[in-house]
Image (cartoon, grey):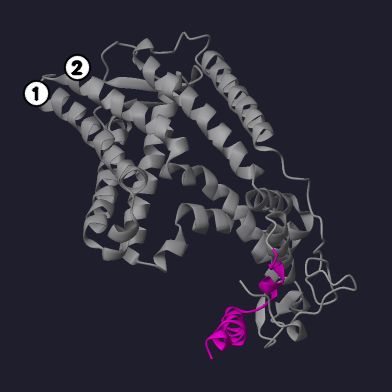
């Protein structure tokens, strides 16, 4: 990429385009943050983080199930899969935030989260962003209402399934009956009674069929995405089987086999239940282990982006002088702290054109076109 003309890019006395100059964004420095770690050091740190998180989860399972008294040994494969899931998520997350761009986003997010000034300026900003950006994902609605609706079905279905499955797998939730066969049941968390209910009531039906409801939601959403990936030319062109299709197929298999277990117990009097239980267990274990290494990892990454959105939002709430203008046309680009953060990330990545962050998209295209005409096109005259 060709640099902008010198008339549009003042430099410091040293002549280096990377050195800060009077026109650069406030807070931009030539060196920002610690030196990048070597790949071997990052891997060691990630392995230690994964081992620590896995050990903490094992301790939580042991003590949360009252020294395994409430732990169901039939659910052991699921529990082991969650331990591997914890290791994989912690390992990959540590590697991810070791990259310059992600590390800077991570730090800015936490700074904005713990900033007393941001809380005074916009006390409701964080709850609203959690609700709109994480919960209802309004940014997807701008792309397609159908995709937004399907994503909501998958999101809330998976969230409901995780909220039920994980505590039950770890032995944190128990359902007990004084008579041994109902219909009166008690739901206990860590042996503390939370609620009593009749299994024949509406509440009881919801309690025992929560996973079925989650499965229906996930199947509806995943089916739409599978249909779209078979029909939409844009999706078909760029999709990869292991990255784009395997997650959807895994969700459908987990959901369908879960529903078949209910179907077998109600309508077939348990016929084929053992085979379906093994098939369901294998699909769930595969999906849990796949999460850190595939497309599902964005579930873990997404909350970190909320911090960056909070950083941008609180920056825009400040005085108008904080908005940086394009160097060429003087049109507003973004807040000065956000542009400074972007320039710092580009310097961390050793990109020699971080000053381009201070130009609007239109002026970038004009400058690139001018440079092409001046340095490339004239060679063919």
Earlier in the chain: of badge 2 and badge 1, it is: 1
Q: Percent from the top left, x then y, of residue 246?
A: 31, 41
Q: Percent from the top left, x then y, of residue 332?
A: 67, 81
The structure residue drawn at horizontal position 43% and vertical position 34%, both measured from the top left corner, is 163
Q: Which structural element holds mark 1?
A: loop
- Does residue 176 appear to the left or right of 348 in the view shown? left
Q: Percent from the top left, x then y, of residue 59?
A: 58, 16
| Residue 321 or residue 153, whichever sits in front | 321
The structure residue drawn at horizontal position 87% and vertical position 73%, both measured from the top left corner, is 12
Residue 378 lies within the magenta run: yes
Residue 361, relative to residue 200: is it above or below?
below
The structure residue drawn at horizontal position 56% and vertical position 58%, both measured from the top left corner, is 128
Q: Percent from the top left, x then y, of residue 106?
A: 66, 49
Number of numbered callouts drawn: 2
Magenta-colored span: 352-381
| Residue 134 or residue 250, whichever sits in front | 250
Name the residue that disc number 1 marks: 268
């Amino acid at each position: 990429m060709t640099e902008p003309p010198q008339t549009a890019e003042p430099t410091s006395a040293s002549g280096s385009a990377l050195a800060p100059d009077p026109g650069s964004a406030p807070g931009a420095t030539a060196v920002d943050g610690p030196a990048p770690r070597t790949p071997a050091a990052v891997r060691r740190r990630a392995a230690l983080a994964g081992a620590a998180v896995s050990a903490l989860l094992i301790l939580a399972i042991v003590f949360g199930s009252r020294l395994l008294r409430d732990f169901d040994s039939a659910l052991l494969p699921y529990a082991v899969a969650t331990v591997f899931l914890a290791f994989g998520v912690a390992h990959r997350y540590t590697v991810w935030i070791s990259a310059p761009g992600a590390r800077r986003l991570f730090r800015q997010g936490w700074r904005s989260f713990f900033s007393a000034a941001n809380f005074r300026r916009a006390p409701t900003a964080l709850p609203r962003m959690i609700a709109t950006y994480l919960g209802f994902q309004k940014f997807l609605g701008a792309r397609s209402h159908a995709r937004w609706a399907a994503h909501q079905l998958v999101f809330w279905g998976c969230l409901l399934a995780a909220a039920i499955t994980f505590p039950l797998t770890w032995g944190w939730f128990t359902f007990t009956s004084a008579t041994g066969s109902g219909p009166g049941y008690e739901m206990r968390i860590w042996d503390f009674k939370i609620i009593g209910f009749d299994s024949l009531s509406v509440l009881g039906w919801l309690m025992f069929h929560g996973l079925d409801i989650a499965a229906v939601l996930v199947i509806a959403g995943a089916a739409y995405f599978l249909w779209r990936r078979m029909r939409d030319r844009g999706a078909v062109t760029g999709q990869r089987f292991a990255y784009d299709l395997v997650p959807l197929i895994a969700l459908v298999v987990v959901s369908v086999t879960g529903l078949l277990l209910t179907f077998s117990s109600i309508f077939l009097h348990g016929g084929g239940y053992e085979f379906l239980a093994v098939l369901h267990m294998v699909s769930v274990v595969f999906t849990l282990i796949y999460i850190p290494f595939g497309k599902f990892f964005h579930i873990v990454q997404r909350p970190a982006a909320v911090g960056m959105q909070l950083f941008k939002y609180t920056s825009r709430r400040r005085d108008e002088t904080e908005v940086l203008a394009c160097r060429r046309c003087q049109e507003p680009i973004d807040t000065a702290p956000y542009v400074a953060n972007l320039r710092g990330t580009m310097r961390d990545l050793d990109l020699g054109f971080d000053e381009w962050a201070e130009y609007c998209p239109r002026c970038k295209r004009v400058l690139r076109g001018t440079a092409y005409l001046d340095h490339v096109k004239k060679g063919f005259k």
